[in-house]
Amino acid sequence: MSQPNMYIQAAEQLSIQQPLSQQWMSEPVLTDHLLTTAMAPNYRDFIDPREARRMGGLIKRALVTTLKVLRDTGIEHPDAFITGTSIGSLVYTERLLDALDESEEAISPTYFMQSPHNTVGSALAIFTHSHGYNTTYSHGACSFDWAVMDAWMQMRLGKIHTALVGGYEEMTQNCFELLQKAGYVGQPGMVPCAEMSMSMMLNTQCSDNCLCQLSGVAMGNLAYRERMRQQLAQMLEAAHLSTTGVSAVMTGKNGNPDNDACYDGIVADLLPDAPLLRYKHLFGENYTASAMGVYAAAHCLAQGRIPDCLHDNNRPARCIKPSAILLVNQMDQQEYSLMLLTKI
């Protein structure tokens, strides 16, 4: 039995760029702040204000991007909601811990109810009255990548045909300061640490409004470089592409010399002559930032152009009309993921 193709039918974002917009492709918002919050949309267009009052910022942003995608695709009840978030509802977690520290009496259950990582996925299902497969991945910087891998495998097995896959992250000043001390964010020359929400619809059926095709997903350990090269070769063969057919490689460079050198080494192993793209200087760094790389690449393929703001100055992309973009994400110089997006 032939395996189904998979398509990104729609993708929306809330980040430090203009909300629910591709304006960043022509007029990107640039900031030198170490910590930047996501731009807020008009929540009233999606959520009743009375309901929104009881929701944390992370859930509201996830709901908005999800509901926008559902509207754009006309799919009210996807077969699956698969969520990637590393630190979950951090604001409510901190409020819960503060309340426990300050009081020995019974406290309101609201903070506890909204603090677990899977609160986002369950809120999406409850709000849309969906009863299908629903799971959350909280695996550090590969949380979103595992969410995509889950959808990829289930679609290939024929268990689902549509999946709302998302990456959602928020940040607090306390957590930022801890991550800054650890050297993860906030270092000289690094991109800002930022909140984000990205939802996309994966579908085995191609419609007129599909952005691009998801032609391959692979993950592994960086200690096994030969395995990584084999996975890429298998992806390209399945997509009927050669190495020269890849228009550009999208990396997660963030200004940290160790992080960026790791990406340079991976690209040198895989596609040493391919033009390079980057996205974190536009959308910021966080544990599920790779979701914004997929979002950016999908819209580049849909619009048939790569904006100048995505070019890596070390090896800028000169391809006028991209046909295939390989996304490379690495986590703490230990794990990696590869995703191949191709033009329809």
Image (cartoon, rainbow, N blue to C red):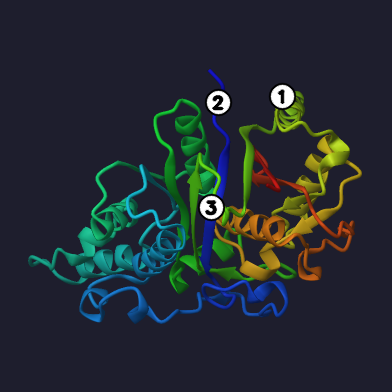
Q: Amino acid at mark 1?
A: Arg
Q: Amino acid at mark 2?
A: Gln
Q: Residue at x 56, y 60 (%)?
A: 286
* Location of mark 1 (residue): 227
For marks 3 and 1, the one nearer the N-term is 3
The dot on residue 304 is none
Counting every numbered tag in the picture gives 3
Q: Nearer the viewer, mark 3 or mark 1?
A: 3
Is 209 placed above or below 160 here?
Answer: below
Image coordinates for residue 187, horizontal then vertical, percent? 67, 67
Is 30 placed above or below 100 here?
Answer: below
For marks 3 and 2, the one nearer the N-term is 2
The residue at the far front in this view is: 208
Q: Residue at x 69, y 47 (%)?
A: 327
Residue 186 visible in rendering: no
The secondary structure type at the circle numbered 3 is strand
Q: Nearer the viewer, mark 1 or mark 2?
A: 2
Q: CA distance from mark 3 to mark 2?
A: 18 Å
Q: Residue at x 29, y 41 (%)?
A: 132
Asked which quadrant contains residue 320, the reply is bottom right
Asked which quadrant contains residue 22, the reply is bottom right
Image coordinates for residue 210, horizontal then vertical, percent? 58, 53
* Location of mark 2 (residue): 3
Image coordinates for residue 156, horizontal then vertical, percent? 51, 28
Would you say 90 lies left or right of 200 here?
A: left
* Location of mark 3 (residue): 9
In depth, the one of 69 and 62 nearer the eye is 69
For marks 1 and 2, the one nearer the N-term is 2
Image coordinates for residue 296, horizontal then vertical, percent? 65, 60
The residue at the far left in this view is: 105
